[in-house]
């Protein structure tokens, strides 16, 4: 599987320059029950369609970014840096 990801700093690059970091999910509160943390860690939606995902540009600017990607076609719709 090969496709291009647009890094907000570096522009279009091969997906092989990046590391996949998983789906973007809402993190449980620090005092949430253990079951909520298990669900957060191990349960994946793995949708067939557009999904927001974490990507790390390991061969470029070394920044984490969020990409909205269609998991069926691998079309990347949007990339952005997370708000700090």
Image (cartoon, rainbow, N blue to C red):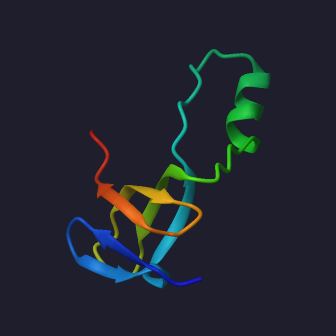
Asked whether, in this view, residue 19 is left or right of residue 80, the answer is right
The quarter of the picture where the C terminus appears is top left
Residue 27, above or below 71: above
Residue 75, above or below 34: below
Q: Residue at x 30, y 71 (%)?
A: 6
In front: 67, or 41?
Answer: 67
Q: Indicate the quadrant where residue 39 lies.
A: top right
Q: Residue at x 51, y 71 (%)?
A: 19
Q: Residue at x 77, y 33 (%)?
A: 38
Report x, y in % for residue 43.
75, 41
Report x, y in % for residue 75.
44, 68
Report x, y in % for residue 37.
71, 30
Asked whether, in this view, residue 7 is left or right of residue 66, the answer is left
In front: 76, or 7?
Answer: 76
Report x, y in % for residue 9.
20, 69
Asked whether, in this view, residue 81 is left or right of residue 47, the answer is left
Q: Residue at x 34, y 82 (%)?
A: 13
Q: Indicate the quadrant where residue 64 lies.
A: bottom left
Asked whether, in this view, residue 81 is left or right of residue 1, the answer is left
The quarter of the picture where the N terminus appears is bottom right
Residue 26, above or below 58: above
How many badges with numbers are in the image?
Answer: 0
């Amino acid at each position: 599987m090969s496709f291009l990801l647009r890094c907000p700093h570096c522009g279009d690059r091969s997906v092989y320059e990046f590391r996949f970091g998983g789906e973007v999910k809402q993190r449980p509160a620090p005092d949430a029950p253990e079951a909520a943390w298990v669900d957060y860690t191990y349960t994946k939606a793995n949708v067939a369609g557009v999904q927001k995902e974490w990507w790390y540009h390991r061969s470029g600017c070394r920044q984490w970014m969020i990409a909205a990607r269609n998991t069926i076609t691998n079309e990347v719709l949007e990339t952005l840096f997370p708000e700090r």
